[in-house]
Image (cartoon, helix red, strand yellow):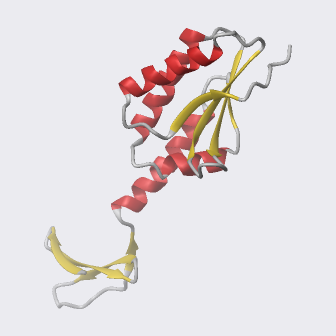
Amino acid sequence: MTSTISAISENYSFTDNQGSHVCRKINSNNNYYPNIPIYSENQIMYAIKHEQISRFLSVLPPRFEIVNKESTVKYLDNLNCDIGEIVEVFIFASQLISSEFFSPLKIIVKKYNDPETKDIYIAMDLRLKKYPENLTEKIWTIRDKLLEKYPDVDWILISTDFVRLKD
């Protein structure tokens, strides 16, 4: 696809060259200057979102432990949502977890590939020193409240791996 636009009396020709975008500046004599690579808005936003997610995961409180950070970042980056929604969901999930469980608590965050269902999602596995008898009910309460506020968020699962925190 080729298009020509005018910007402050200079013309530019934008051409999709086998998936990569190039820009040719056209002078008043209709001579083309050499191709200048440009990047689509999506490519720029991808790089920015990826970096923002990585930074966000790096500044989470110490009770969060990110496992396989790069694959977690890549998965979150490929979601059809922006960084704001990701941050909101993490913060709200953390608040819900804090309201049901008290310290000491560790939240293991990782991209999880379910071998049985082939589902892929972000798992937030809760680890406690002592697991309450009503653990399952508390986790379901958290999940229900999360889905009530974010009904379209199907990429996160709060659960436990039953690993006990050490003293």
Residue 72 horizontal/vertical position (percent)? 61, 45
Residue 110 lies, with reference to residue 113, above or below; the image says above
| Nearest the eye: 14 or 12 | 14
Residue 90 horizontal/vertical position (percent)? 51, 29
Q: Which image quadrant for residue 166?
A: top right
Residue 20 lies, with reference to residue 91, above or below; the image says below
* Residue depicted at 57% across the width and 15% down the height: 137
| Nearest the eye: 142 or 73 | 142
Quadrant (top left/top right/bottom left/bottom right) for the N terminus: bottom left
- Among all residues in the image, which is located at the extreme right? 167
Q: Which image quadrant for residue 14?
A: bottom left
Quadrant (top left/top right/bottom left/bottom right) for the C terminus: top right
* Residue depicted at 54% across the width and 10% down the height: 99
Q: Does residue 50 appear to the left or right of 80 in the view shown? A: right
Residue 45 lies, with reference to residue 20, above or below; the image says above
- Among all residues in the image, which is located at the extreme front? 116
* Residue depicted at 62% across the width and 11% down the height: 101
Count up the numbered dots: 0
| Nearest the eye: 128 or 22 | 128
Q: Does residue 79 appear to the left or right of 68 in the view shown? A: left
* Residue depicted at 50% across the width and 49% down the height: 77
Residue 53 lies, with reference to residue 158, above or below; the image says below
Residue 89 horizontal/vertical position (percent)? 46, 30
